Amino acid sequence: MPTLLEGKTALVLGVANRWSLAYAISQAFVREGAKLILTYQGDRQKQTVEELAAELKAHQAIACDVTQDAQLAALTEGLQQQGTVLNAVVHSIAFANREDLSRPFLETSRSGYALAQDVSAYSLVAVARAAAPLMTAGGSVTTLTYLGSTRVVENYNVMGVAKAALEATMRYLANDLGPSNIRVNAISAGAVKTASARGISGFSKMLEKAAQLAPLRRNTDPAEVADAAVFLASDLGRGVTGNVLFVDAGMQMMGFTRAE
Ligand code: NAD
């Protein structure tokens, strides 16, 4: 088996449980020989993530709520003190109020809009700024996005707007960090049943429809998203930055119906 990430250290933010895309990515990173550092959002997730970290033989699991600048600063400082050089960072984080993912977009509150932007888009700036000083040998920052950034997907609402901001954020960061040989990209994953996805009203129906419509006639496997993340984090992706890479069974290029 090739080990594409041998000798690399990867920080993965966004493991909540076994269904998290970040968990599949972590598994693939370990398979490819990376030294893994995980973060967890808060005390509620600490035990689960620590158990998963042990299972994955991760080096450590660190608390990091991305809305808390002090926690991000502590993350940088802690890793700096250990002499950690990061080669890859995965940002797999999003949040919006449940009611904003079920009612008409027109009803979105100011605070709900700001919250979705803060956690789901601004956090990439905050994470990249915290990680960059540790990426002294260059490397890769990858975030996770969804088609709802450019297309209207029912009930995705405020998260679609946040993903549009996230993708633009990714491009501006790619421009800023390019001279440090740090690449910044997004993977646009097809719909996968995770805890976050369950918060979107009508998600199961959407999964069914996507499987019918996608050129590959099936849904996205988290392992496929993970392998794309390996590519971007590895030297194979060395020329790729500022990109949205679709891993969605081809769904993104389809029209809205299939005659059959
Ligand atoms: P998930 O619920 O497993 O992961 C979301 C993660 O965000 C959780 O680990 C949660 O703890 C974390 N998070 C939320 N607020 C946070 C905060 N303040 N600080 C730190 N962490 C915080 O769901 P997922 O589907 O694996 O989502 C991961 C990423 O993939 C998200 O950006 C999501 O939008 C994106 N994505 C998901 C799908 C899908 O269909 N599941 C498709 C495309 C993109």
Image (spheres, rainbow, N blue to C red):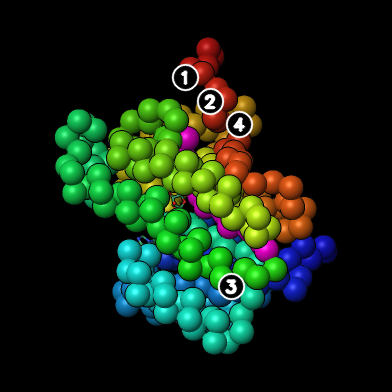
Q: Is residue 134 visible?
A: yes
Return the disc, 1 or 3, that comes first in the chain's sequence: 3
Determine contact: label 1, label 2, CB under 8 Å: yes
Give residue 250's mark: 4
User: Looking at the image, which residue is at 51% across and 72% down?
Assistant: 38
Disc 3 crowd, CA 10 A, few/some/many (<14, 14-19, 20+): some
Of badges 3 and 4, the one in the foreground is 3
Q: Is residue 116 left or right of residue 48?
A: left
Counting from the top left corner in percent of width and height, residue 176 is at 56, 52
Residue 140 belongs to the span the image colors magenta: yes
Q: Quadrant of residue 25?
A: bottom right
Q: In the structure shown, which secondary structural element does the residue marked by tag 3 occupy?
A: helix
Counting from the top left corner in percent of width and height, residue 164 is at 42, 38
Return the disc, 1 or 4, that comes first in the chain's sequence: 4
Query: Most extreme residue toward the bottom, as rendered?
Result: 81
Task: Please name whichever residue, 108 or 209, is drawn nearer the observer in this view of the structure.
Answer: 108
Residue 13 lies, with reference to residue 220, above or below; the image says: below
Return the disc, 3 or 4, that comes first in the chain's sequence: 3
Return the disc, 4 or 2, that comes first in the chain's sequence: 2
Determine contact: label 4, label 2, CB under 8 Å: no
Give residue 217's mark: none
User: Looking at the image, which residue is at 61% across and 84% down?
Assistant: 83
